[in-house]
Image (cartoon, rainbow, N blue to C red):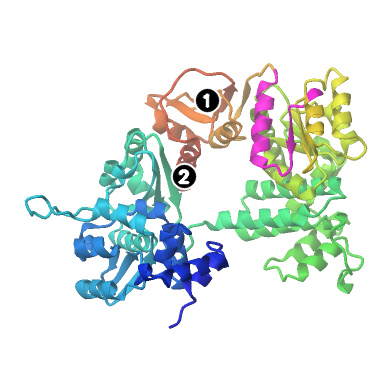
Amino acid sequence: MSHTPLGEICVSLGLMTPPEVSAVLDRMAQPASTGMRFGEVAVSMNIIEESELSRALAQQFRLNLVPDDRVDKLQIAADVLALVSAPLMRERLLVPTFLEPEKRVLSLLTADPTDITALRQVQAATQASRLRLFVASKAALRRLIERVVPVVAPGGERVAARPLDVREVDADEALTLLVEPDSAMAAALRRLDGLEGGEAEVVGDPEAVSLLLGHDRQVRLFYRRAVARQLDPYFAGWRRACPGLRLCPVESFGLSGRSAVSDERARAFFLQLTEFLLLAGESRQMDARARVRRTARLANALADELELRPEDHDAVSIAALFCDVDELSLISGMLDSRDEGRRFALALTVLRQFDPPWDIEGLLGGVERRLVGQEGPGRDVRVEVLYTARAAVRAAVVDGGDPVAALGTEAARHDARVLRALAQVLRRQGLRHQVAAGGGQSSAVIVAEREAAVLTALEARFGAAGFDVIVAADGEQVVQLARNLVPAAIVANLRLPRKDGISLLLELRRHDNTRNIPVILITDKGGGAKDIARGLELGAEDVLEKPVHPDVVVAKLRRAVARRPNGSVGISGVLADLSLVDLLQTLTLGGKTALVQITGGAEAGGVQVREGQIVAAQHGRRTGDEALFSLATLEEGRFEVRFEDSGADNIHGQAEFLLLEALRRRDEARNAEG
């Protein structure tokens, strides 16, 4: 089999220029370079580095390249190292990494895939049916051999080989553990891990996990949800031994043909992507965009509250996004003749082209019949969810508000069960916004941005961070909304229609009730230092130049809101409206410091959150993690949130993983009761 010349590959990869290739070839023609190959000469001339040569060799022979940092972290079993003699490994710079016993396939790191003589020696010594080659740089292989290959003691005694211990590599290195009590699954995981470079430690015995943990280590520990109950007794001890431990439950490791990503998460990704793509190109109808997003969010929340089947939930989510698509100017074209005269004609024409696996046409048809009075409430709960969500958005029902009062006489036309669910959703969202805002001020954030894609990204990220996002179409609307709502903050483009960012700032500073609202301005790329300086002089919280990352804007937004004096007050409610897990998630996402007290059950309890981290918990006589998990299972009782620090400290895990575990235990308790 012929291969592309190495020099040609180096040029294609940008490692060398054609004149440099010519210089190497000229040097190879000289007597002093007799016997040297192209790559060796190029390295000796300092034209390329050894790591770059390895990359070119891997490309030339279509092999996988193992980067230096991965070679430095490899773990190799002693019995595999013993298959090849130490002198051969040292002399020819090759290291066996994994032997698949059933097929006798040996994985081998080599610096030179053309060293056929050495490769044959390895194959003969190991009796391997086949070699699976990986390319690594000479420097990385030398370092690896220094650490793991047996050496001969001064007296001639052979020092036993032993694998590289991950604890000896670097105490600051993050470690990945896969804990799998099933021996067959663990063996399969080890084989898979070996093929992928051996970056993870597969542990079959939970008792052995503590040997790999350290107080100053950062460790990610993956385990299947199916074995969570079996591992549950070990979690608290592992966290004490390693405060930096992150527990990562997965549905499976993918060995059974199932994805490690849950169906629920995959659905959520698909629907959010659909929403983003639908709205990202729309730049003219900002009010319609906001209405579409609000309807979709409310319909999704109602579907969750009413516990619709996943397929019905998906159908409602898609229909909610498209039922008002005719109001967006980015959707255009000829209507299908079958749809002329129908209320949702454009949505049906667009969706029918993609043959959706849900009965969207029947669902939108049901909403249309409800709107014209051809049907009464109660026939199809999916239709009622869409019908009610759409009406609530048009009636400007706000989070925490009373939907019956907002809908007025129209409320009698809605299904009573869906109206009750809507009231519950609005109460829960209202509580979340109060908590996110710190109790004493609005959680609303007014966003005004000319680019639809940027606006969509900011809306989604702000909503996930616990803020109630209000979209304004122009600068004049920003000022009107600010006077009426007195929001927690404003995020606006400097070049808005009707009133630009500078004029907007001046207008807000003239009035007492809007003077202290933090304003973050965003300038278009190349806006210039003059715009930035002018905005800061007039009191903007910050002026950011595009491209901006939504996470950066959220961080600055939280800082601005936290600095604003608001006279934070306590917030109280019932767990039936907002569960403790949801409440803590809102506090941690917002980076809040708060004491949450739970009463009304057999035993009182409390959780301390400090700067977005859960640091303490108590439930009766229980403290720490176990108290937190015990409180998370409570379905009844009252909560009170006070934005203060009690000074308690008995939990040291990461908030996101503590909440995942709390959620798992809550769901487990519900299933047991059911």
State the residue at coordinates (20%, 72%).
Answer: 125
* Residue 541 badge: none
438, above or below 284, in the image: above
Camera-side residue: 164 or 24?
24
Image coordinates of residue 122 in percent, x first then y, are 24, 71
Image coordinates of residue 563 in percent, x first then y, are 67, 21
Query: Could you tell whether 488 is left or right of 538 in the image?
Result: left
Q: Which residue is mark 2?
A: 664
State the residue at coordinates (81%, 49%).
Answer: 289
158, above or below 401, in the image: below
Q: Which residue is mark 1?
A: 610
Camera-side residue: 183 or 459?
459
Query: What's the amino acid at mark 2?
Result: Arg
Q: Secondary structure at mark 2?
A: helix
224, above or below 472, in the image: below
Q: Is residue 563 magenta?
A: yes
Q: In this picture, which residue range is highlighted in magenta?
A: 537-565
**Mark 1 in CB contact with mark 2 (< 8 angstroms):** no
